[in-house]
Image (cartoon, rainbow, N blue to C red):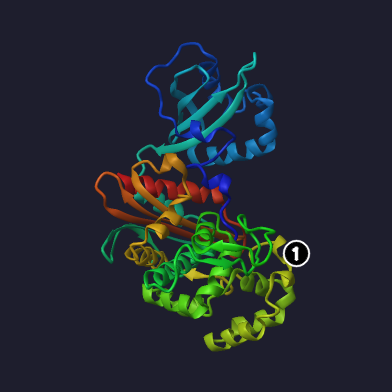
Amino acid sequence: MKPLLASLLAASMITLPGTAALAQQAPDAVNAANTAFDRRAAQLVGLLAGRVAFADYFDPSFQAALPEAQFKAINASLIAQYGQPVAVDRATSADGRAGIVLLRFEKGVGTVALEVGQGADARVTGLRLTGFEMANDGFDKVAAEIAALPGSSGFLVALIDGKAIKPLASANADRQFAIGSTFKLYILDELAAQVAAGQRQWSDVVPLSHASFSSAGTANWPKDTPVTLQTLANWMISVSDNGATDTLLHLLGREKIEARMRGTGHGDPSRNVPFLTTVDAFALKGNNFAAEREAFIAGDDKAQRKLIEANKDRLTLSNVDGVSFSGGPRFIDSLEWFASPNDIARAFIDLRERKSDTAMSAMAINNGVGPGAAKGWSYLGYKGGSELGVLSMSLLGQRAADGKWYVVTMSWNNAEAAVSTEKMVGLVTRLLALAAR
């Protein structure tokens, strides 16, 4: 239910402290010889291999932002995915302080943005992996790695031709998975539909009526703060703000969103009826509502809706038992939002057919994979979702080379243990890169 960590989704694979401008600058054709940048670039292999000391390589400002233990954990994950670092293929900088390094690993080449401080010891102040190209990669290789993941998983890479879904690669594309916050696409779709019908305007001002957890945009905001519908939509999609989400769900109407979901062609809409708010789900998963949870899981759609309605004054943020969520996955097979990879593709198709620049822009604020992985795409919209045992990443893209539209979506569930965000991001960015070719 909480959004995927922004620090992991802001770049292709991992993100370390550095400047956003540096992450997007193009390599300069001239490589100044024997500069501070060159010397630090040459040490990258030794740093990642553990032969160069963390404290000697990084500036104190970097160490304060990213402690050594955290850096080592990220580095271990990187090596697990792409093998040991082998050599620096190229290091280019215009000023001898900041530039781009092409770093070869056993399984491919990473693009690293590197920035060196002005101090006499010229320690590194910024390091960012902005993209990765796997050597001899293919859909079959990625599919095999996805199939080997613990728990259950499914994915789809498909060309979107009008309303037709034309798969390039897939596995379990019709299987229902818990998708976390990806369900918010259906709310965005209904909002765009009501605007298109003249019932609302994106500029309408409404009160922020419902607080929730994981609300990066609205945390601790006063109840009934006036905000526009466009602002709520942007928060809901770009940072997965749950307060914005629940406010929109109550405003638009639970049953209207359910009807919109059915209209997209969802394969098993009953799994999402009644359409839960984030607080509904948080509360029912917690120990404070154990009896209600048991009745909800056992009931049909009508009984579940009646239970939600009867307890609407109790299913509030103040009654959520946060302690319950400190362990492992909780009821992800029965108290969640569900969709198959094909369902998500159909939701994207429906959203695109709204012809709403505002809705499309909301999905593009945070493209989920960063500038490196976005190369090759003239448009990239994203929504992801996560909670313990649940990860979902879904992208709608227009390929720059030919203007064709594609969907790349993957879901990974494990009711027994948490799943790896780093591994998921790596797999999805590889699928995206393959689709861009």
Residue 366 appears in view: yes
Task: Give the quadrant of residue 320.
Answer: bottom right
Circle count = 1
Residue at the far top: name it.
Answer: 34
Q: Is residue 368 above or below residue 295?
A: above
Could you tell whether 172 is left or right of 286 in the image? Answer: left
Residue 188 in the image, given as x and y percentages of width and height = 46, 65
What residue sits right under mark 1 in the picture?
Answer: 323
On-image quarter of the C terminus: top left
Residue 157 in the image, given as x and y percentages of width and height = 35, 56
Q: Amino acid at mark 1?
A: Val
Closer-to-camera residue (365/402): 365
Q: Residue at x 27, y 65 (%)?
A: 164
Q: Is residue 90 above or below residue 404?
A: above
Q: Is residue 69 above or below residue 302?
A: above
On-image quarter of the N terminus: bottom right
SS label for mark 1: helix
Q: Is residue 414 above or below residue 97?
A: below
Q: Residue at x 62, y 82 (%)?
A: 308
Query: Alpha-carbon neighbours of circle 1 within 10 Å: few (<14), some, or many (≥20)?
Result: few
Closer-to-camera residue (110/145): 110
Could you tell whether 171 is left or right of 35 in the image? Answer: left
Q: Residue at x 54, y 64 (%)?
A: 180
Residue 1 appears in view: no
Residue 358 in the image, given as x and y percentages of width and height = 41, 58
Residue 121 in the image, given as x and y percentages of width and height = 64, 15
Q: Residue at x 52, y 44 (%)?
A: 10
